[in-house]
């Protein structure tokens, strides 16, 4: 009974962090949503139509359809990463918002989990936006594409946890460039967003398959294009493993940083 009560209390307090962040975001929701629609639409139109005329079909799909699923996953990654790094760092170090929260009965683990939930929600909002765009462009094959939304949320949980782990080490905003340049950018280029990874050397393919974005795309692309989804347990396990380990490490790091 005690454990159940503590779990309910933990989730309740974490959700209060999530609720606080969503209320703050609501004041700037218009520009934020514009960005969620605008950037993916540019990728699809410029690369999909422009480059697609030269590329033709990829894995039996139009290049536009192939690209759309990759852009959806990348959008989830970018939204979660930005929120877990820049926005979270602002609340942690610049505004000292987290210290104010810790003056209440809320603990560090609840703050971190609340931030992870909020960043994953931002991913979900972003994916909803691009999914609407993709549907309007005729790139969604059937109603099974609705399952992309829970996958987007899990992807958001994974990358927001990773981002908060990076934030736990950050001394300034410039620190995030290391993570973006050395991890996010190579991962996006190698994980099958713009081209199939089987065109890469064998060693690079192994590296690509070890990255969480590859597994998100492997789930989203067939759902969006009407293909068969395979190795579901493997793909979800990798996303959950990355997120779980990063979340635990981020909590411990932030606890040491805030409670000296």
Image (cartoon, grey):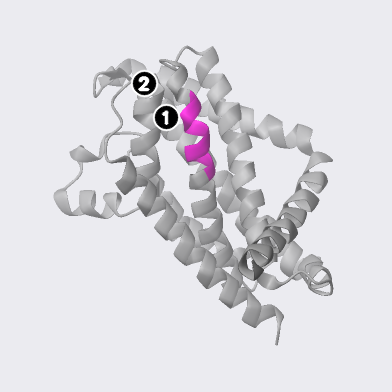
In this view, 260 is above or below 128: below
Q: Are marks 2 and 1 in contact (CB under 8 Å)?
A: yes
State the image quarter where residue 259 is shown.
bottom right
In this view, the residue in front, 253 or 203, is 253
Residue named by callout 1: 69
- Magenta segment: 146-153
Which quadrant: the N terminus?
bottom right
- Locate residue 65, reporting x and y percent: 38, 21
| Residue 97 picture location, percent across and down | 80, 65
**Residue 79 part of the magenta segment:** no
User: Which quarter shows the C terminus?
Assistant: bottom right
Residue 193 in sight: no
Q: Is residue 120 left or right of residue 44?
A: right
Question: How many marks are shown on the rendered structure?
Answer: 2
Q: Earlier in the sequence, mark 2 or mark 1?
A: 1
Q: What secondary structure is marked by label 1?
A: helix
Q: In the picture provided, is 94 more to the left or to the right than 166? A: right
| Residue found at x 59% / y 71% | 251
> Can you tell which of label 2 and label 1 is closer to the viewer?
2
Q: Residues within 10 Å of mark 2 (few under 14, many from 20)?
A: some
Residue 102 point in image, percent of width and height? 78, 73
User: Residue farthest to the front?
Assistant: 1
* Location of mark 2 (residue): 225
Q: Residue at x 56, y 55 (%)?
A: 160
Q: Residue furthest bottom?
A: 260
Q: Regarding mark 2 in the picture, which secondary structure is present there?
A: helix
């Amino acid at each position: 009974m005690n454990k159940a009560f503590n779990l309910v209390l933990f989730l309740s307090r974490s959700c209060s962090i999530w609720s606080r962040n969503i209320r703050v975001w609501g004041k700037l929701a218009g520009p934020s949503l514009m960005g969620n629609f605008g950037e993916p639409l540019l990728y699809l139109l410029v690369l999909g139509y422009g480059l697609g005329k030269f590329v033709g079909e990829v894995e039996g799909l139009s290049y536009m359809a192939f690209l759309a699923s990759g852009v959806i996953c990348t959008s989830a990654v970018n939204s979660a990463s930005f929120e877990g790094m820049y926005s979270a760092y602002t609340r942690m170090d610049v505004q000292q918002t987290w210290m104010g929260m810790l003056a209440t009965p809320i603990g560090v683990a609840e703050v971190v989990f609340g931030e992870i939930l909020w960043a994953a929600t931002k991913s979900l909002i972003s994916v909803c936006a691009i999914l609407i765009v993709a549907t309007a462009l005729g790139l969604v094959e059937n109603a099974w594409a609705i399952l992309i939304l829970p996958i987007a949320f899990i992807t958001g949980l994974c990358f927001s946890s990773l981002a908060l782990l990076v934030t736990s080490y950050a001394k300034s905003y410039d620190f995030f460039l290391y993570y973006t340049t050395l991890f996010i950018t190579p991962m996006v280029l190698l994980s099958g967003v713009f081209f199939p990874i089987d065109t890469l050397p064998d060693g690079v393919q192994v590296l690509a398959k070890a990255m969480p974005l590859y597994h998100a795309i492997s789930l989203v692309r067939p759902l969006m294009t009407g293909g068969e989804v395979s190795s579901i347990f493997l793909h979800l396990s990798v996303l959950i493993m990355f997120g779980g380990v990063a979340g635990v490490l981020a909590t411990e790091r932030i606890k040491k940083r805030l409670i000296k």
